[in-house]
């Protein structure tokens, strides 16, 4: 990045017009020529511009700057969020004087916000501010930039976009030196995102590669993450024995480190295996254990467990427990747009568990709110669950045309799931 580009970058960062920056230093046309690289200003004008922008224009040790932020990233990777916060505060004590420093700060601040707080809005703003700069997507910067973009898209449930960004990050591995844990984490993220896209073979391949690195470097908690993900994939392809085995290996690690974050995910998935075996009592017990393990975790970690537990309460006819659970779930969503899907699930079960159980109101809600939301997002798994409920209602009320419509939609949704590689509802 040449002198003019650096001056233009910080002028935009500090929200100054060319007129405001040039005032008393040089003319606006002359500043424009400097920013466009047409002319090289005198050292005196350079210094005046630097002083007004409060930046340095001299050489900078980019590797030293990067290492400080990689140290922050490593604490996030190790889930030591307290130490990560301390490192983050130290890194932001003074204003940034160099473009590379400012760019790295925005990239890694977005990673910090996403990994430690799941805060997407500010991360989006930060990444958009540097996206237009050509050298951001090259070399080492590109590796971290695309990881940040991948994380952002993942937390926004834009899994196709996340997968693309993470594969872009992978292309940087060949030509740059990264630590093993960085490679492992990226491979794990690719496996995680491939899983959300039902790319079972790809998810298994990348997750096993990540597991190999974590085992080799003795990062046992991240090994457990991989075991959990492998278990989920095996569960999807109906290999319940191998899924149970992977969750069991992960549980051994979780208990060794007394890690509730891991236990919450493990009990959740063991509960799903119990539901597949029609063992509702065991499933309810495991889902409750999962919620207990997640008590100090972010709200987003608890929501899927509440949905699965609500289903078992419906199956075993426990409306009182179900209604109390759903009220808890609705409180956790707090009108957060990212949780809208969960909110709709909870509203459905609120109708189910309500003492009066007004079927007409429930179906009206499903047709006009719940179904359009999941159709817009092509969430076929949920639609295959909800379409037949509407179909049965219309059939029982002798509205056969409407019933046929929703049964047909069920078949089409099942076909879509099959195309995606989903072999169970």
Image (cartoon, rainbow, N blue to C red):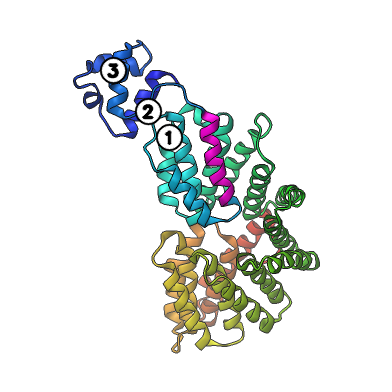
Please report contact status of discs 2 and 3: CB closer than 8 Å, yes or no: no
Is 21 positioned to the left or the right of 221 in the image? Answer: left
Q: Are marks 3 and 1 in contact (CB under 8 Å)?
A: no
User: To which residue does mark 2 refer?
Assistant: 9
Mark 3 — residue?
A: 31
Q: Measured from the top left, where is residue 163 in percent x and y?
A: 60, 45
Residue 51 horizontal/vertical position (percent): 29, 25
> Along the line of sight, which residue is nearer the eye, 407 or 366?
366
Q: Quadrant of residue 274?
A: bottom right
- Give the residue at x 67% y 42%: 183
Point 60% across, 65% down: residue: 261
Of the residues under marks 2 and 1, which one precedes in the sequence? 2
Q: Which residues are magenta?
A: 62-76
Q: Which residue is mark 1?
A: 102
Residue 210, percent from left and from top: 71, 48
Residue 362 appears left or right of 396:
left
Q: Position of residue 409 (x, y in %)?
A: 57, 64
Kindly check if marks 2 and 1 are in contact, taking CB atoms under 8 A apart as contact.
yes
Asked whether 166 or 197 is in front, the reply is 166
Viewer-nearest residue: 166 or 395: 166
Gap in Å between the C-alphas at discs 2 and 1?
A: 10 Å
Of the residues under marks 3 and 1, which one precedes in the sequence? 3
């Amino acid at each position: 990045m040449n002198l003019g580009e650096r001056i233009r970058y910080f002028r935009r960062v500090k929200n100054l017009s060319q007129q405001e920056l040039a005032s008393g230093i040089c003319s606006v046309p002359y500043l424009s020529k400097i920013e466009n690289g047409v002319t090289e200003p005198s050292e005196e004008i350079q210094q005046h511009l630097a002083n007004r922008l409060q930046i340095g224009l001299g050489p900078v040790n980019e590797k030293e700057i990067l290492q400080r932020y990689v140290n922050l990233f490593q604490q996030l990777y190790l889930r030591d969020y307290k130490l990560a916060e301390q490192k983050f505060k130290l890194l932001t004590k003074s204003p940034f004087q160099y473009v590379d420093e400012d760019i790295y700060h925005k990239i890694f601040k977005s990673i910090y916000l996403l990994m430690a707080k799941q805060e997407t809005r500010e991360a989006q703003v930060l990444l958009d501010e540097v996206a237009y700069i050509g050298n951001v997507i090259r070399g080492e910067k590109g590796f971290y930039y695309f990881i940040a973009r991948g994380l952002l898209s993942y937390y926004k449930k834009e899994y196709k976009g996340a997968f693309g960004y993470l594969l872009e990050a992978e292309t940087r591995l060949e030509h740059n030196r990264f630590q093993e844990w960085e490679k492992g984490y990226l491979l794990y993220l690719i496996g995680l995102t491939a899983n959300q896209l039902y790319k079972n073979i790809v998810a298994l391949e990348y997750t096993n590669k990540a597991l190999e690195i974590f085992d080799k470097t003795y990062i046992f908690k991240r090994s457990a993450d991989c075991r959990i993900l492998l278990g989920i994939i095996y569960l999807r392809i109906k290999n319940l024995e191998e899924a149970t085995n992977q969750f069991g290996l992960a549980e051994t690690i979780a208990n060794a480190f007394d890690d509730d974050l891991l236990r919450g995910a493990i009990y959740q998935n063991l509960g799903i295996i119990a539901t597949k075996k029609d063992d509702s009592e065991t499933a309810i017990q495991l889902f409750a254990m999962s919620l207990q393990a997640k008590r100090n975790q972010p709200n987003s970690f608890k929501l899927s467990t509440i949905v699965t537990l609500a289903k078992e309460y419906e199956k075993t006819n426990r409306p009182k427990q179900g209604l109390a659970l759903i009220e808890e779930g609705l409180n956790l969503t707090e009108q957060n747009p990212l949780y809208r899907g969960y909110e709709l699930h909870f509203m459905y079960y609120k109708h189910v568990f309500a003492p009066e159980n007004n079927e007409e109101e429930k179906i009206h809600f499903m047709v006009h709110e719940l179904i359009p939301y999941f159709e817009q997002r092509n969430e076929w798994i949920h639609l295959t669950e909800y379409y037949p409920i509407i179909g049965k209602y219309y059939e029982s009320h002798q509205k056969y045309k409407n019933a046929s419509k929703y049964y047909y939609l069920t078949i089409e949704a099942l076909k879509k799931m099959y195309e995606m590689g989903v072999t169970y509802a």
